[in-house]
Amino acid sequence: MKTRKKLFAAAAVVVLAAAGAWTACRGSVEHSGTAVAEAKAQYHCPMHPTYVSDKPGNCPICSMKLVLTESPSPGTAASPGRRVAYYRSPMDPSVRSATPTKDSMGMDFVAVYEDEIQGSAVAGRAVVSLSPERRQVLGLRSEPVRAVSLEREIRTVGRVAADERRLHHIHIKYEAYIEHLHVDYVGKFVRKGQALASLYSPELMATQQEYLLAWRARQQLASSSIPSVARGGVDLLEAARRRLLLWDIRAADIARLERTGEVQRTLDLYSPVSGYVTAKMAQHGMRVTPADTLFDIADLSHLWVMADVYESDLPAVAVGMPATLSLSYLPGRTWRGSVTYIAPTVEEKTRTIKLRVEVDNADGALKPEMFADVVLKTALGRGLVAPESALLRTGERTLVFVDHGDGRLEPREIQAGAKVAEGVQVSRGLAEGERVVTAANFLLDSESSLKAALAVLSPAPPAAQSHEGHR
């Protein structure tokens, strides 16, 4: 009986010991899980990604509230495929460690990679490494560099003007008086050969009389047996005829003079071209001389468009390049022409250069002094194009940040060319398919500059530097 009691007592002790051990183990596991969860809870500053803490609070640099990071900080663990050279204090870059640790304030040391120590090819900039979480916080985006067929497009405004080569000033070659005006207002359309005015000229009447005398003399001397006499009559008539022709008297009027044998008191002045009367100086009854302009007639079936381009666009402009014109109040209607003239001088005040585009205007839709939108296009061949938002222009050079896809963002100096519809031409510094940062690149540039400055101020990293006082 006593033996049985001892066995029951021993069994109870074993059960209690097992239960205690199970409880302790469970508590240990729960405590370990909590510790792991707490270890994974990291906080970082949205403005200073290099500052990481395992406690919530404010950033000691800018006093901004820290943001919770779900995954471990990149400052405490190396990115895959990259080797960590050393770890540095986020507050004092000269304090470094060969292993991950914390400083006296409990801040995690930041990992410095070997490729970052080597630096970048751009002076004053350093390679920046960002985790996916920090990229998302900054709103960082990137786009690939593409190879496309480049076409430069220049948009400007032009003023429609009459073709100066088709503008005719109507004069007479003798003194006369205007007896009647057939064209009596500006803007009237006249056709070639249409009468403009009737003129009375005593000098012209005398010349007509001389022509009739020469004509009759030629008829009388034509039957002469002396060749020189017959020839003299012909020469006299030819001289009188040439004088009338040089005064712009038509051959039809001379034939009528021969046919009727009567001197005409007035003769009509005819238009040499078809077009619109743009100016009329002739008045009824006025006395006119060869120095006076009576009418201005413009042929508007072919026009000029005078456009202005900035001197920076001059290398892309050439004589013969195509141009397209449009009017804002006639959507869908375009006119095509070509550049026929580029001014040799620059406008001093506007810093622009005049160029001339010639267009056909058979239907008369375009009017002089209209304003038109002008688009000039020139092919630049095939080349690389980067988004314009990716370019950082410092004044002395143009930079982009190349996204390598493994967290590294490398500053790169490029040579930018013409601005095209797809972006900006890149003639040097990038290869097709490389991705460039297009958003948050100004923040990235600030971080890169700061990192490069700290690298210059910091001494060379030791193999292993003690940091006992920072634990």
Image (tube, rainbow, N blue to C red):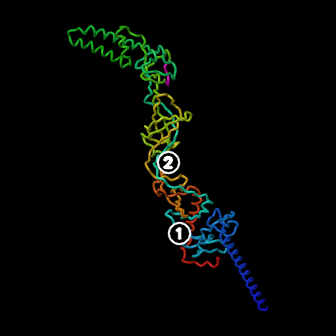
Which one is in front, 428 or 438?
438
Q: Is residue 113 above or below residue 412?
A: below
Q: Nearer the viewer, residue 402 or 442?
A: 402
Which quadrant of the figure has residue 6?
bottom right
Chain-order first, disc 2 or disc 1? 1
Q: Position of residue 20 (x, y in %)?
A: 73, 81
Q: Position of residue 395 (x, y in %)?
A: 53, 55
Q: Amino acid at mark 2?
A: Val
- Residue for point 59% across, 68% down: 74
**Which residue is the site of mark 2?**
420
278 magenta-colored: yes
* Amino acid on which the number 1 mark rests in the picture: Arg
In which image quadrant can residue 263 be found? top left
On screen, residue 221 versus residue 270, left or right, reads left
Residue sitting at the far bottom = 2
Q: Which residue is mark 1?
A: 82
Residue located at (79% from left, 91% from top): 1
**What mark, if any, has residue 189 been given in the picture?**
none
Against 226, is 131 above or below? below
Question: In this rendering, is residue 25 above or below 126?
Answer: below
Residue 173 as seen in the image, left or right of residue 120: left
The location of residue 79, given as percent across then percent down, is 56, 68
Q: Which residues are magenta?
A: 277-282
Please identify the residue farthest to the front as the structure is shown.
1
- Quadrant for the C terminus, please: bottom right
Q: Is residue 425 magenta?
A: no
Q: Nearer the viewer, mark 2 or mark 1?
A: 1
- Crowd rating for badge 2 (residues with CA inside 10 Å; few <14, some 14–19, many 20+): some
